[in-house]
Amino acid sequence: MAEVLVYVDHVDGAVRKPTLELLTLARRIGEPVAVALGAGAENTAAVLAEHGAVKVLTADAPEFAEYLVVPKVDALQAAHEAVSPIAVLVPSSAEGKEIAARLAVRIGSGIITDAVDLEAGDEGPVATQSAFAASFTTKSRVSKGTPVITVKPNSAPVEAAPAAGAVAALDVTFGALATGTKVTARTPRESTGRPELTEAAIVVSGGRGVNGAENFAIIEALADSLGAAVGASRAAVDAGWYPHTNQVGQTGKSVSPQLYIATGISGAIQHRAGMQTSKTIVAINKDAEAPIFELVDYGVVGDLFEVVPQLTQEIQARKG
């Protein structure tokens, strides 16, 4: 069976959930070959093998940590040359998209971004994308070269499928551009105890209707009762009510959770672009004509300051 390269997103050997989802998709079209780079790369092998990786290519070098994405592109290009895969799958993060785009240019191939599903086709892998605020679903395939495809988090289930997971060292030669942009400092993100926004199964977002930074405590309480991440619309972020790192939308982050709850969000097209692929969407808004209601599975017309606390209390009562 043909092999599929899967770029591994990990932190010191701890594999992040989107990579395990990619392995599920990769098994639909071939045999997954994982590429793990940087410190702790070899420690990823057991988890990757448990989820279907037949082989794990690893490389560690100071360049992966000290410089931006080009060393990783060099390594992925080397893996592509060594394996000759039928596709390369990359998590659809900001860094992942840059890596994928640079790789596609290097190997003279087409690229598909933000896929939400993947299937085998007679002429190569076929990717499904959601477009125009979920009004359309498109199916595409790359017609030239090895398809490079980035996949949104939460697009596939994490499924155990034990495989060999044989570890092999990847020989990487860094090009002249690899050291062009150096990382001068890193600041650890402060932990909130909540899931990562782009990976969360449930997201609760607040918008202009929250009417102040102090009122986001109501949104956070609902999120915590559900074990959810907290998001915000651009209006709320621009007003300084919540950090930009939590912005959902065209100029923020794209999310695709199992459940998305929009509170006090009117539903501008820019916001919808960042959450339209959520599996189930619930909106709470006192304006019955708000555009968000055109998109939702369930809508509540009401004052969020009355509805959200009651919802939180009911969830806590049922959990108790």
Image (cartoon, grey):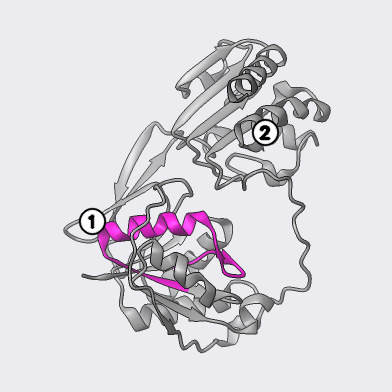
Q: Is residue 54 left or right of residue 277?
A: left
Q: State the image coordinates of residue 9 (x, y, percent, origin top left).
A: 53, 64
Disc 2/disc 1 C-alpha distance (Å): 39 Å
Q: Residue at x 52, y 23 (%)?
A: 282
Q: In the rendered view of the protein, which quadrant contains the C terminus?
A: top right
Q: Residue at x 57, y 27 (%)?
A: 261
- Amino acid at the residue labelled 2: Asp
- Which sits in the foreground, 190 or 281? 190
Q: Secondary structure at mark 2?
A: helix
- Amino acid at the residue labelled 1: Ala
Q: Dot 1, how many residues are within 10 Å of its Cα: few (below 14), some (14-19), or many (20+)? A: some
- Which sits in the foreground, 201 or 128? 201
Confirm whether residue 203 shows in the render. yes
Look at mark 1 in the image and give the residue it sits on.
120
Q: State the image coordinates of residue 231 (x, y, percent, origin top left).
A: 65, 37
Q: Is residue 179 left or right of residue 89?
A: right
Q: Residue at x 58, y 35 (%)?
A: 203
Q: Earlier in the sequence, mark 2 or mark 1?
A: 1
Look at mark 2 in the image and give the residue it sits on.
224
Q: Which residues are magenta?
A: 7-35
User: Does 46 appear in magenta?
Assistant: no
Q: Quadrant of residue 188?
A: bottom right
